[in-house]
Amino acid sequence: MTSTSSYSYLHKSPQDVLNDIDFQLTLEPALLTKLTKAFLEEINVGLGRYGEDMAMVPSFVTGVPDGSEVGTFLALDLGGTNLRVCEVVLNGDKTFRLRQQKYKVSDQLKTGEATVLFDYLADSVDAFLTTHPPESPTSPISDVPDVLPLGLTFSFPVEQTALGSGTILTWTKGFSAKNAIGNDVVKLLQDAFDRKHMHVKCVALVNDTVGALLSRAYTSGGCMLGAIFGTGTNGAYLEEVAKIPKLANNPAATKGGYMVVNTEWGAFNNKRTHLPSTPFDSALDRTSINPRFQAFEKFISGMYLGEITRHILLSLIDAAPRPMLFGGKATKVVNDQWGLDTSVMSEVEEAWEMRVTVDPTVAKDLDGVGNINEIGAEPRSFPGEIGENLLWDGDDHDILPRWDILSTPEGLASLNPKVKEKLERVRKVLVNRLEYADGDVELRDAAIVRWTCHLVARRAALLSGVAVAAILLQTGRATFIQDGQNGQTVPSTTEEPTSKKVNGANGTHDVNGLSKVTGTIKDGLEEKIGVGVDGSLIQFYPHFERTMRESLRSIVGSDAESRVEIGLAKDGSGVGAALCALQALKQGF
């Protein structure tokens, strides 16, 4: 599908056009705080009622591992063309061993009878166990030693009613298996195991974001938030059961304590009453497959950032009375919907900020590389950051291009040679990735595209910080910075739940103990706040985490932000599902 720009910049100078785009995409600290308050409101509405956009789905997981558990657990991950069977062996020292195998799901299986599909899932688990016999005994927590506990990651809409139970609401992703909707997915799978007399029991149904939290908790010793910042975005965190009114009639409510809640925060502010929407965001939403849904996700996830950038570039290509980019030429990559992938943005920014190794003794004396004013740009006063023995050779600050300097031979000649070298690297990326002829891309084009990519990605990282800050505030780990406490932790007045002990490999484990439930990690005298993350943006996009932390500081202050320990959550849909099976056994399932 081709898309054309509907924007017109008549009666505006080129610099005014750039200034206007910059204004629309720049988020001030006051707005971040306002968004966080709206986020908190939706969190509590979702905790109180079913059927809200921000669903706040109870997972029925009431504790997290601490890394001392041992045992062998299976995971089954179904969510698309392939299914994956995993064996996870927990070593008891915050490490694990993983063996896995993928199996193709044919179109016939996707659209046939549900029993045939689930029989195939059971056959795949059986085949895996035949070729990969368990390396070690099953979990010592299990009452039936010869039965392997399995956690199921089922990436389709489900109404979860217990840790090991959930009703299929609908199929997506090309699946339409008959006689499945309205049935318990765990029972469908277990019936298939039983028909084949397999010694496998499906004990847990898990969302991959909940799995990310559990995975990070095991490898770090504690975690209170699992978050995905990749193709999509979502978060799951530990909440007090007393703060989940919609569970009032559920047996889980009488037990009290804590429970992991899957926020589904990608749907925050679907009404777009608070999000800083621009014409570019509106164009993306209108032409997407789900208009007016997943609003927050469309501002911050990797699936959409390239498309927002493409709309901005098209508006400059089509600017009237004269084009402002690429001489008015648009390639197929730029002209086609979804043609510009977010990976192109990342490559552009990496080209601008090529890494060089530096001596740490001299790094502290460097204030960026080159003077921002030397590149025809207006500087922003953001503090620099120097990595450990590593420095980007470009300043990654939000640099607003100066049209007058970049558009004249004299202005270009005045540029610092190092800046010209960086712009040339970006120019080559654009020629290669956007499929332009070499002569169609000038240094000015490179500067404008790099600035656009940075604006869009920076906004995404700042908004990601809003989501994390909201969870810190919701769980009493921070206060708003304007409350005069610099974001310090508020002592909890909530009565701690009664601990439940279970026998594990290394003695007794406190299922509802404070350290495991609240996700804090002792580091000397200071308690760190454990956050497990996964996704391509947080892992690979230049400075995404750093900018997210900047957002946190502006909302809850430097004290709270400095205690947030962000670490990679390994394989939430695989390892996380196996750990959910562990947790199910701890909870007596």
Image (cartoon, rainbow, N blue to C red):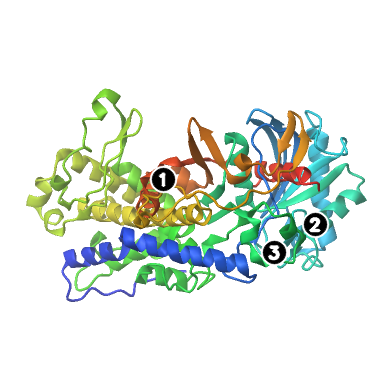
Q: Residue 580 appears at what percent x and percent y? A: 70, 45
Label at residue 117: 2
Q: Secondary structure at mark 2?
A: helix
Q: Secondary structure at mark 1?
A: helix
Q: Amino acid at mark 1?
A: Glu
Measured Cα–Cα span from mark 3 to mark 2: 33 Å
Q: Amino acid at mark 2?
A: Leu
Disc 1 target residue: 561
**First in sequence: mark 3 or mark 1?**
3
Q: Nearer the viewer, residue 255 or 380?
A: 255
Query: Residue 248 vs residue 328: left or right?
Result: right
Q: Identify the residue at horizontal 67%, vertical 44% (top origin).
A: 574
Q: Amino acid at mark 3?
A: Leu
Q: Is residue 138 above or below residue 378?
A: above
Q: Nearer the viewer, residue 492 or 528?
A: 492
Indicate the quadrant where residue 452 lies: bottom left
Q: Residue 363 appears at what percent x and percent y? A: 26, 29
Label at residue 247: 3
Q: Residue 384 appears at what percent x and percent y? A: 27, 41
Q: Is residue 105 above or below residue 132?
A: below
Query: Residue 456 vs residue 127: left or right?
Result: left
Indicate the quadrant where residue 52 lies: bottom right
